[in-house]
């Protein structure tokens, strides 16, 4: 095989993390995975999809559902998504149209919200441009940013999310370095962040937007609000978004039906600022002409049927129960160990656990080897921290992302027992 | 709205052509479209999809079809695709494995073949890199190349496809200019090219590969074989591919189920050279984690059922009949006009028609306005020619791409009558 010159982007996209995790899983099939961010297989809506597929294919002109759609997606689903979004916002669609100029024309359908995140990165960021992120944050987004040659820079973050004063210090630092113009994006996962489970507090949502309005009144620095877990609050109440507080067109909102319904349909969406609608559609057209038209009608049928809310309620209850199981099992197997702690999430799919500083959780560490030996997998926390930080703080390497998404209660208990043994073996 | 600085790529992706055509169609809903490259709605397989959806969702562990898949796609469909590809090649899979090292691991599933073309462009081409193309060629690919900042350069082309001597002259020219290292790709649509309907002759397929082996023995210049229309030969016989002639890993093959089955499922595929498999998977992972898992199993079910071939046969027959209708109607309404001609295709979806030089078919031309007035649409030929040519030849602007894909026989006859009136009005 010759050593072919690939594009710069091909090099930027290379990332061994997921490959390493998958290889571990394949080599060790009896392994219990607290690593996979997949959804609970028991909640996957086979009956709803079967009924919707049959119904939608029995509609007049059903053949047209099998035709090409458009890059922005089927109007029928964009309208349903807009209504669902308005419900989450607690504001009628008419009012959103009047006060925020929001119409279905600004709702773009993508292959999961991941494609929307990727399109935003492509449309906004040149190589060398800067995206500010929480630490820790969604590690796949770090790969997406690297994939366009952008710099992801970590901002001070605590149990209430990104620290506004830390964000301001980061802006100061880039201003002093003459790089403020390269800062184009702040990426936030305000609800039950993957991986930390942290909720960005309501006060900080307001403070971050006020800070950006003050420092960047032209709206040149966008906020990308990744709301993937917004519907998965254990108490069922959606929090007030950053988008809803935005006085202008700064906030870009990404949503998905992967976590609440079925990732196998690959339907996510974005609510785009007016100036980005056409560039995003052009880029999506270049990449794939639009997502599967059939799936869009199928999901629209589910939403029209009124059965979606009850399904989400079930999903939410299931994750709350499984989270309780994992937390209790962690208490049993890791409780009281000095320097070992974890956060109790109020929604989402993840528990973030921290070991004593100096006890590495990274690939190749004694803990990773012990976990592999015990037959349990987690996501090393290091992957979730952008290497570069605004305040020069080092990249922590002693945390773990534990997902209660895939395993059932018995699996979670056994996985926690294995993890407990592995941790005890290295402390 | 502020004038926000978007990425360079956002500017590269902007392309008004499809937007202009769509706006024309919306403004003028009684318009008959010979422009759209959509498939015949009458052939869309509602019953096959309905049965496959029901069957696949009744399988044990059907819930897992609604889970995330992998970036490369479901093994079940990759194996079916490999078998289908082997049938087209006329070579058993075991022999392909032994002689070419081809396994299902090199079959990548994408959102239509368009996403595969886009991934190839991303992985191989840096801004300023060169892709050589036929003239005319698939105009969406020209947009995809522009979207990564690459230079598409037109090579001499005639009724048997790209001229090998023209390709060699192009390589000479780039060598003399010190730019040969920037030539990374030759893009070819060998079967019933969109838009010209031209088949790249068997001799030229061999000659082009021999030429590249001679000039670039290291295989640095890849050939991207876009086989979107390969199954749509009117006589049912697939032609021998460039891929099958490749002594090494130069040829990248793109196929799709959009034209032969249903574009609304968005399933295309690529057969990747060994060195590109991982970079393509990494890039696809960054962009969307993988295409819809559910759809992949649904299509696998169709292929497993053995009903696919009969369906393709029907599709093929339908297009042959509709092509005959359009050709007869063109004869009736445009026949004998001086300087007006068109090609008789042996497959695919398109008739390429040429007007006298100097009679522009481009947007805004008197003909375009006459056609809009008559209520008929075509794709202006100019869009299908890369602006830059290797031999300095000007970009032709007096052709039209006419598709017989969407309209039924009566629609094709009426559209040809309208086009005839429009053409006569400007000659």
Image: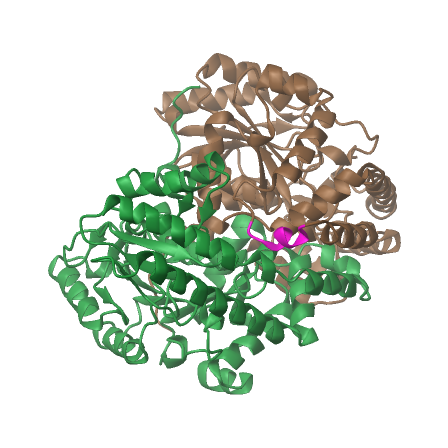
Chain colours: A brown, B green
User: Residue pushed farthest top?
Assistant: A214
Q: Horizontal placement of A162 versus A418: left or right?
A: left
Residue A277, image x, y percentages: 49, 32
Quadrant in the picture for the N terminus of chain B = top left
Q: Quadrant of residue B393?
A: bottom left
Q: Is residue A198 magenta?
A: no
Residue sitting at 39 percent across and 52 percent down?
B417
Residue A161, image x, y percentages: 65, 27
Residue A340, above or below B126: above
User: Residue pushed farthest left?
Assistant: B176
| Depth check, front residue: B139 or A147 | B139
Residue sitting at 72 percent across and 31 percent down?
A84
Label the magenta part by its dominant secondary structure.
Answer: helix
Q: Quadrant of residue A344?
A: top right
Residue B37 seen from this side: no
Residue A200, above or below A398: above
Residue B26, above or below B262: above
| Depth check, front residue: A68 or B397 | B397
Residue A81, image x, y percentages: 67, 34
Residue sitting at 41 percent across and 19 percent down?
B2
Q: Is residue A67 magenta?
A: yes
- Highlighted magenta segment, given as a residue range: A61-68
């Amino acid at each position: 095989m010759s050593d072919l010159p690939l594009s710069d982007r091909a090099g930027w996209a290379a990332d061994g993390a997921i490959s390493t995790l998958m290889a571990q899983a394949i080599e060790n099939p009896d392994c219990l995975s607290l690593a996979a961010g997949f959804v609970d297989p028991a909640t996957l809506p086979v009956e709803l999809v079967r009924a919707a597929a049959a119904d939608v294919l029995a509609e007049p002109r059903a053949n047209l559902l099998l035709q090409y759609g458009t890059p922005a997606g089927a109007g029928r689903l964009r309208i349903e998504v807009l209504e669902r979004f308005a419900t989450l916002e607690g504001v009628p669609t008419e009012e959103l149209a009047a006060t925020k100029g929001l119409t279905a024309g600004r709702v773009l359908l993508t292959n999961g919200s991941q494609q929307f995140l990727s399109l935003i990165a492509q449309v906004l960021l040149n190589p060398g441009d800067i995206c500010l992120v929480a630490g820790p944050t969604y590690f796949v987004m770090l790969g997406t940013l690297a994939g366009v040659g952008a710099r992801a820079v970590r901002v001070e973050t605590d149990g209430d999310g990104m620290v506004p004063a830390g964000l301001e210090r980061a802006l100061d630092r880039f201003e002093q370095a003459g790089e403020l113009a390269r800062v184009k994006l702040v990426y936030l996962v305000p609800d039950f962040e993957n991986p930390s489970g942290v909720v960005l507090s309501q006060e900080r949502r307001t403070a971050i937007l006020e800070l950006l309005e003050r420092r960047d009144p032209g709206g040149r620095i966008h906020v990308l609000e990744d709301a993937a877990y917004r519907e998965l609050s254990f108490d069922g109440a959606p929090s007030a978004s950053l988008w809803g507080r935005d006085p202008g067109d700064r906030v870009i909102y990404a949503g998905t039906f992967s976590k609440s319904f079925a990732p196998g349909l690959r339907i996510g969406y974005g609510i785009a600022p007016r100036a980005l609608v056409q560039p995003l559609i052009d880029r999506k057209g270049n990449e794939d002409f639009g997502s599967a038209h059939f799936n869009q009608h199928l999901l629209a049928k589910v939403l029209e049927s009124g059965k979606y809310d009850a399904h989400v309620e079930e999903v939410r209850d299931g994750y709350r129960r499984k989270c309780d199981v994992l937390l209790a099992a962690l208490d049993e197997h890791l409780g009281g160990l000095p320097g070992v702690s974890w956060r109790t999430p109020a929604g989402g799919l993840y528990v973030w656990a921290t070991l004593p500083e100096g006890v590495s959780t990274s690939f190749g560490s004694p803990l990773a080897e012990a976990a592999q030996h015990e037959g349990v997998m987690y996501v090393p926390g290091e992957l979730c921290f952008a290497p570069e930080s605004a305040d020069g703080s080092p990249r922590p390497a002693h945390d773990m992302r534990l997902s209660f998404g895939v395993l059932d209660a018995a699996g979670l208990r056994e996985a926690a027992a294995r993890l407990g043994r592995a941790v005890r073996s290295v402390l």
